[in-house]
């Protein structure tokens, strides 16, 4: 559908349209599958930009110098927003109204509730506060809610006082409940005896202490301390190279999942997923409960790695949970596995979160180590959609400083990446489409790719209108250098898009009249100071679901904003 020439908020601009027949006649005949090679012309008031979209992904542009200067001048503002999202775990340090507001202002995009700690009453309070914040902030600062299941964790029992373990001493773990002596404590898992073998290495708290299994009895595992330390109550136990035979979703997890359904959370982070079967099981349950909640498996067990492709294919993203991953597998493999998981998610156009120990020292100290700063930068450079804080914001002494450090490091790293001239490889190349007839999804991918190249060339933000979120997700996948403003009339879609790299989701009711909706969107962005008068924006009308346009047409427009 053609855009009107005159609308509020925009300079007069003809809609993006195929070149007139006379211009096309000069070009040699093209096969049907070269539909992408149609010349596209975008006109702006007093300046013109000639753009040709070619099948090889090239996007030549001949611009008047004044327009070039104006668009370049807005690039500083367009690229000054952080694109990598920040997940904050909410706990005793941050579970008040004041702190949640401050975390949001500092840069939090997703509030995570760790169901290993707290109860439903305390988590209900957090959910209600986040929803209150979202209701009061309607101009782009959306906080999504993530419920992280406890999973089948093996833990030591309660001890009245910490037990000091020394190198070389004998120490035992028993499946008898309530045992706590100088040389023996209980574990909470009856099959612990069967899961370990003589010669195995037991890791306490992800490797803070380690013990070698020497022998077993009917109810105890006898060990020798390799690396000592202070053993406190309910410490997490791993066997290096092995996963516990417990089910991925426990009875407690099912209760927590039901709690999440009742409260309409946006994401489940599912602990210790070993294969795709558990993802299908959970999704079947959510479908039966009519719950629109996305499932993010935590890749943290040895068994999950051989099944990585099928797990992510069945899911809505993934989290690189490096703590347990580095306990069950050789620690030197963790950076390689992180990169592989990020690549796999990117290839499947699914969001990926890098988590655990990112600013661990800031639990007790006001500044990070230089290695932690580099860790954040690496995750950003690899293409993570989000990076996560755990104890830093849950019970740390400096939660706001930790978020600010993560924000500034991510922003600075992104500033070195998003330069279309220096780093053209950041935009995923469009794959050749060899079919005679394009499917809707293939056309959407092609236009998403070319819209990204256009926005990168002109250094403009992207505005997309979506009912399902699919085009906003696709644009995020191509990693444009500027922000994607995703307007949606679906509250659930708005919440979910908060996790995706570079996307600022905004809820807005759509009018039957496209131009009226465009105008209201521009007014919203002007009010929120996301754009200003005189800026150029790239407007995308494409996607599997048609809004306003005819199903067979896809539009990319560049318009100049008027006050």
Image (cartoon, rainbow, N blue to C red):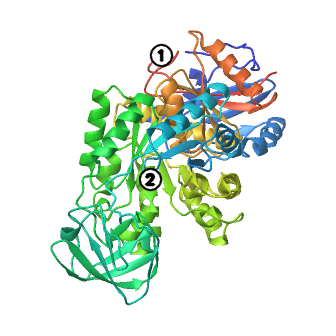
According to the picture, the residue beneath numbered tag 1 turns out to be 550
Instruction: Please rate how many residues cluster around mark 1, counting C-alpha atoms within 10 Å: few if below 14, some from 14 to 19, many from 20.
Output: few
Quarter of the C terminus within the rendering: top right
According to the picture, the residue beneath numbered tag 2 turns out to be 319
Q: Which residue is found at the position 71% from the left and 41% from the top?
A: 105
Q: Which residue is found at the position 29% from the left and 73% from the top?
A: 173
Viewer-nearest of labels 2 and 1? Answer: 2
297, above or below 545, in the image: below
Q: What label sits on residue 357 in the rendered view? A: none
Quarter of the N terminus within the rendering: top right
Q: Is 228 placed left or right of 285 in the picture?
A: right
Q: Which residue is found at the position 42% from the left and 88% from the top?
A: 167
Q: Quadrant of residue 401?
A: bottom right
Toward the viewer: 546 or 342?
342
For label 1, the SS is loop
> Whole-Å distance between the Cαs marked 2 and 1?
38 Å
């Amino acid at each position: 559908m053609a855009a009107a020439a005159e609308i509020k908020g925009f300079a007069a601009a003809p809609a993006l349209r195929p070149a007139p027949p006379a211009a096309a006649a000069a070009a040699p005949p093209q096969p049907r599958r070269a539909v992408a090679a149609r010349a596209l012309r975008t006109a702006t008031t007093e300046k013109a930009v000639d753009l040709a979209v070619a099948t090889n992904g090239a996007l030549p542009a001949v611009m008047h110098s004044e327009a070039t200067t104006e668009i370049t001048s807005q690039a500083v503002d367009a690229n000054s927003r952080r694109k990598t999202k920040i997940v904050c775990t909410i706990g005793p340090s941050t579970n008040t109204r004041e702190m949640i507001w401050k975390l949001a202002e500092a840069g939090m995009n997703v509030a995570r509730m760790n169901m290993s700690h707290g109860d439903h009453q305390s988590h209900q309070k957090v959910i209600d506060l986040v929803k209150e914040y979202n209701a009061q902030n309607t101009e782009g600062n959306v906080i999504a809610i993530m419920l992280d299941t406890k999973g089948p964790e093996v833990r030591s029992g309660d001890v009245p006082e910490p037990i000091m373990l020394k190198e070389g001493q004998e120490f035992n773990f028993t499946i008898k409940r309530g045992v706590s002596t100088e040389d023996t404590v209980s574990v909470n898992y009856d099959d612990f005896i069967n899961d370990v073998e003589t010669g195995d290495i037991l890791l306490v708290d992800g490797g803070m202490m380690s013990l070698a299994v020497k022998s077993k009895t009917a109810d105890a595992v006898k060990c020798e301390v390799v690396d000592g330390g202070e053993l406190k109550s309910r410490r997490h136990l791993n066997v290096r190279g092995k996963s516990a035979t417990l089910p991925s979703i426990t009875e407690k997890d099912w209760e927590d999942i039901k709690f999440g359904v009742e409260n309409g959370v946006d994401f489940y982070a599912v602990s210790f997923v070993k294969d795709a079967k558990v993802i299908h099981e959970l999704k079947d349950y959510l479908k039966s409960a009519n719950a629109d909640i996305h499932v993010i498996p935590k890749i943290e067990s040895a068994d999950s790695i051989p099944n990585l492709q099928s797990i992510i294919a069945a899911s809505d993203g993934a989290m690189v949970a490096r703590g347990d991953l580095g306990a069950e597998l050789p620690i030197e493999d963790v950076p390689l596995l992180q990169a592989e998981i990020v690549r796999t998610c990117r290839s499947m156009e699914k969001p990926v979160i890098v988590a655990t120990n990112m600013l661990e020292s800031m639990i007790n100290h006001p500044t990070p180590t230089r290695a932690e700063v580099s860790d954040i930068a690496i995750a950003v450079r690899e293409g993570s959609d989000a990076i996560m804080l755990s104890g830093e914001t849950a019970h740390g002494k400096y939660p706001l400083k930790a978020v600010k450090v993560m924000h500034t490091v991510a922003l600075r790293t992104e500033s070195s990446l998003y330069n279309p001239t220096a780093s053209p490889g950041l935009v995923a190349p469009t794959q050749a489409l060899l079919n005679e007839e394009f499917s809707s999804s293939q056309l959407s991918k092609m236009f998403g790719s070319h819209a990204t190249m256009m926005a990168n060339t002109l250094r403009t933000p992207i505005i997309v209108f979506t009912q399902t979120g699919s085009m906003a997700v696709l644009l995020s996948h191509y990693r444009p250098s500027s922000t994607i403003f995703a307007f949606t009339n679906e509250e659930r879609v708005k919440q979910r898009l908060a996790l995706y790299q570079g996307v600022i989701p905004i809820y807005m009711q759509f009018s039957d009249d496209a131009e009226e909706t465009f105008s209201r969107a521009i007014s919203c962005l002007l009010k929120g100071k996301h754009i200003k008068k005189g800026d150029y924006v790239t407007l995308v009308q494409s996607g599997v679901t048609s809004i306003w346009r005819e199903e067979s047409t896809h539009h990319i427009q560049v318009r100049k904003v008027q006050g």
